[in-house]
Amino acid sequence: MRKLLILLMVGITLAMNAQPVQPETEKEKDKRMEWFKEAKLGIFIHYGIYAVNGIDESWSFFNGYINYDDYMKQLDGFTAANYDASAWAKLIKESGAKYAVLTTKHHDGVALWDSKTEHYNTVNNTPAGQDIVAPFVKALRKEKLKVGLYYSLIDWSYPDYPAHLRHEVRYDNDEERWNRFTDFYFTQMNELSKRFNPDLYWFDGDWEHSAEEWKSKELRDLMLGYNKNVILNSRLQGYGDYDTPEQGVPIKKPNNPYWELCMTMNDSWGYQHNDHNYKTPYQLIRIFVDCISMGGNLLLDIGPKADGTIPQPQIDILKEFGRWTSKHSEAIYGTHAGIEHKYYPGPSAISKNGETLYLYLDRVPNHQLMVNGLDAEIENVRVVGSNEQLVYDHNNNLLSVTVEPKHCDQTMTVIAVDLKHSIKLVNPATSLQEYELAAMMENEPWKTKHQIALNDMDKPIAHGHYNGATALSKDKNILYLMVDGKNNGPLVLRGLKNKINRIWVVGNGTKLSHKVIGKQYWSEVPGITYVDLPHKVLDKDMTIVAVLLDGELELYRGKGHVIESN
């Protein structure tokens, strides 16, 4: 009888809400997406029974790391005893994030809200005995943060869903069972929309079936029927609004003007007590800046413990984000994608009115900061966060700015170039790298010290892989990286497909260590390579770091990937 009532409710709700949605104009979509485009930072929250044992969410049983029954025994340990949605929301707001996304149901099928469907939920099947989603939504709205709800389309626990384990399926081509499953998940989507009316849905798992099988168009129409301004992510087989590259920062700006990189703080989405491999605040803020520079967002993940508390390392990272975002807010929120690297060899952004150019600086430079091809009158140049005026020279469309150590932030400095009118750029006749190297070649002691490398240098590599001057050796097996000044953290090299055999400082031979983070075994997308560069080995003028590869240089030039395993 209960199942019959649920099916009847689905039919009535679909008839009422899933009316065909009129196509929106580009202007209407821009208006709907405006808050998302301007938000820049969101917090992803993977919270569920997988935190009890501290294992991979859902994938643990699907991939056979643990059997299904033992995985589901975690229901008995999920207490949420110290869950405080208000504290979560305050911390999220303090970080500078403008929205948050909570996993209302992962692939394991355990709903975090009081679902009336006959399936697992935290109210009826765990000691927590409570709805996790309701207080979360209420707390976010109290802090004036946008509400995002993650929902897994696939459900490896539901008896009428085909897939169960990687090498075991329940059935093939059974239309009646499949329709029972889609009725079930449409019922859950109706519950979420009716009860919580989120600003954003973050779907996942669409790779297992086609858009037609998922009834993606009907689902989109249903969601927009509840809220005409709701935003849907791209994991809905062509019916979403924005792209979601995962773990790896795109090398090139995605084609979709709306996109968001989702990334873990360590190597895990949910809480895992053995995973202490946290990225540093510098590394994460550096990634955040890359997203801003390409006009995208960062959705930074946290994984609360089973009792609802957030691990201290994650709190510390969020608080450092808060320090940095509050100091540099004008160069973050509402900005547009920055200028190409041929104009400035690092991350940048442009204000909404186009009259301020923001330059992000991850070091204390030895030489002047340069912007090439800037054909616009300058009002002033200042340090964001203090508004201290900087000395600059602007001739023949080349801007040179003097930045002293006292002006620099410990993590990432932002320089604002205020223009009298909207920014205008012209194609530079001479590259910035040529300017830099020409100046250094006049320095005879420096030239002599680095002569071996200078004699071996050929062309620079493509923009986007390293923020600074580069050169490839004549045999294409050595990558040379130039470092101007004192680096705030490790050197960042993105999109390197090669293995590294050795790294050293040219001129003194010091061997350097490196680490690759974010490389997924199932994906062709490389991780980010970080090279540790101690300040004591830096050259007082310009340092050259040599990276010996396992063969000819190979670079990834794609735009990110979506996870399909773990």
Image (cartoon, rainbow, N blue to C red):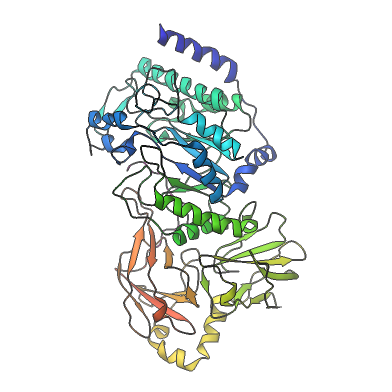
Left or right of 75 in this view: 396? right
Q: Which residues are magenta?
A: 555-566
Where residue 281 sits, quadrant-wise, is bottom left
Left or right of 528 in this view: 55? left
Left or right of 292 in this view: 279? left
Of all residues, the one furthest to the bottom in this rendering is 444
Q: Visible in this render: residue 124?
A: yes
What count of labels does the image hold?
A: 0
Instruction: Give residue 187's position: percent from left, percent from top.
Output: 47, 19
Q: Residue at x 58, y 75 (%)?
A: 406
In the image, residue 423 sits, relative to residue 185, either above or below, namely below
Give 313 or 560, whichever is nearer the viewer: 313
In the image, residue 20 sits, relative to residue 541, either above or below, namely above
Q: Residue at x 71, y 66 (%)?
A: 418
Quadrant of the drawing holding the C terminus: top left
Q: Residue at x 30, y 23 (%)?
A: 172
Magenta stretch holds residue 564: yes
The secondary structure that most of the magenta stretch takes on is loop
Instruction: Give residue 16's position: percent from left, percent from top.
Output: 59, 16
Magenta stretch holds residue 22: no
Of all residues, the one furthest to the right in this rendering is 420
Instruction: Give residue 52's position: percent from left, percent from top.
Output: 31, 37
Instruction: Give residue 230's position: percent from left, percent from top.
Output: 59, 33
In the image, residue 56 sits, relative to residue 375, either above or below, namely above
Q: Visible in this render: residue 235?
A: no
Quadrant of the drawing holding the N terminus: top left
Of all residues, the one furthest to the front in this rendering is 82
In the image, residue 339 sits, relative to residue 227, either above or below, namely below
Give 109 or 213, whichever is nearer the viewer: 109
Of all residues, the one furthest to the top in this rendering is 1
